[in-house]
Amino acid sequence: MYNDPENPIGVFDSGVGGLTVVRALMERLPFEHIQYFGDTARVPYGVKSVETIAHYTTQIAQFLLERRVKVLIIACNTMAAVAAGVVRDLSPVPVLDVIEAGALSALAATKTRRIGVIGTPTTVNSNAYARAIHEIEPEARIVSQACPLFVPLVEEGWLDHPVTRLTAQEYLRGVLAERIDSLVLGCTHYPLLKPMLAEVAGPGVALVDSAEAMAERTAALLTDLDLHTPSRRPADYHFHVTDVPLRFQTIGERFLGRSLNNVHVVKW
Ligand code: DGL
């Protein structure tokens, strides 16, 4: 039975970045159990081909469905950009993805309908955010920028480092010149750069955090489907990863904002 409210929520990402979504879910829905999958052996996805990403994404979704998750959440913007359809086709449970959630939040945040989107090269090349936003608001003007250096900088922990600030100024120059009033942080890693990006973008630009948007969407879906857990016991969290690389614990805890326990290594 998939639609048992006591079942966990399944969340997945190419690596540890999706823990920003788990963190937002833990805050918004503290009693919900979570099974997380991070493909730490094969990250990063943001520079891989669509075929490869679709193949990996299918494997991960099937893994979580075997664990009887009641909802599947694609926390990775890159997977959501190019493989959300593949997951929806195979899944017997509802599928939410960060792009859909981020697009809705961007439209709620903008007044001028001039929206910036930053993400990995694959996400930006896919145009998925622009398509999702235009489906709801065809008049919106979308300006996108790939920021491939942000992922390694965040993993290095350089969240407020002069190198990261310079990199952000460089990446955002063209987007800001288009007089956007909201900027979608279209990658799992970018919410950690929020304070610095807010300074670089200035007070006239609202930052749209796709992790927070995702947690709100999940809460609304559970309400609509009457799938909130009735349990008021502490939730169970399980983290499945395909590798435990150097500094995994430190980086993971930075994303999650708390200690990372119950880590299981999956050998494929
Ligand atoms: N999780 C990816 C995303 O949100 C970033 C890391 C990667 O390239 O795999 O786009």
Image (spheres, rainbow, N blue to C red):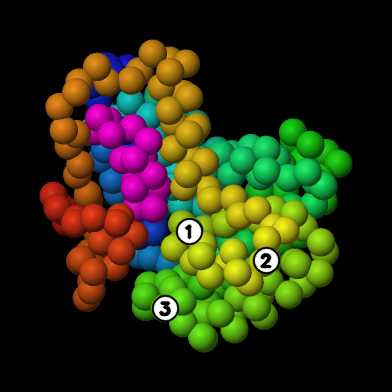
Counting from the top left corner in percent of width and height, residue 154 is at 42, 72
Q: Is 29 or 43 nearer to us in this picture?
A: 29
**Quarter location, residue 24:** top left
What distance separates the C-alpha of mark 1 from that of mark 3?
13 Å
Q: Is 64 or 257 nearer to us in this picture?
A: 257
Bounds of the magenta span? 18-33
Residue 94 left/right relative to 182: left
Which of the marked residues, 2 or 3, is nearer the chain's N terminus? Answer: 3
* Residue at disc 2, secondary structure: loop
Residue occupied by mark 2: 202
Counting from the top left corner in percent of width and height, residue 135 is at 75, 35
Q: Disc 3 residue type?
A: Trp
Of all residues, the one furthest to the right in this rendering is: 139
Looking at the rendered image, the disc whose residue lies closer to the viewer, 2 or 1, is 2
Q: Is 93 or 36 nearer to us in this picture?
A: 36
Q: Where 197 sits versus 52, above or below? A: below
The reply to whether callout 2 and callout 1 are in contact (CB within 8 Å) is no
- Look at 22% across and 49% down and name the residue there: 239
- Residue 26 among those drawn in magenta: yes
In which quadrant will I find the C terminus?
A: bottom left
Looking at the rendered image, the disc whose residue lies closer to the viewer, 2 or 3, is 2
Mark 3 is surrounded, within 10 Å at the Cα level, by few (under 14), some (14 to 19) or many (20 or more) other residues, namely: some
Of all residues, the one furthest to the top in this rendering is: 226
Mark 1 is surrounded, within 10 Å at the Cα level, by few (under 14), some (14 to 19) or many (20 or more) other residues, namely: many
- Look at 81% across and 61% down and name the residue there: 179
Residue 158's disc is: 3
- Look at 44% across and 31% down and name the residue there: 218
Q: Is 165 or 61 nearer to us in this picture?
A: 165
Residue occupied by mark 1: 191
- Residue 94 among those drawn in magenta: no
Counting from the top left corner in percent of width and height, residue 91 is at 42, 29
Mark 2 is surrounded, within 10 Å at the Cα level, by few (under 14), some (14 to 19) or many (20 or more) other residues, namely: few
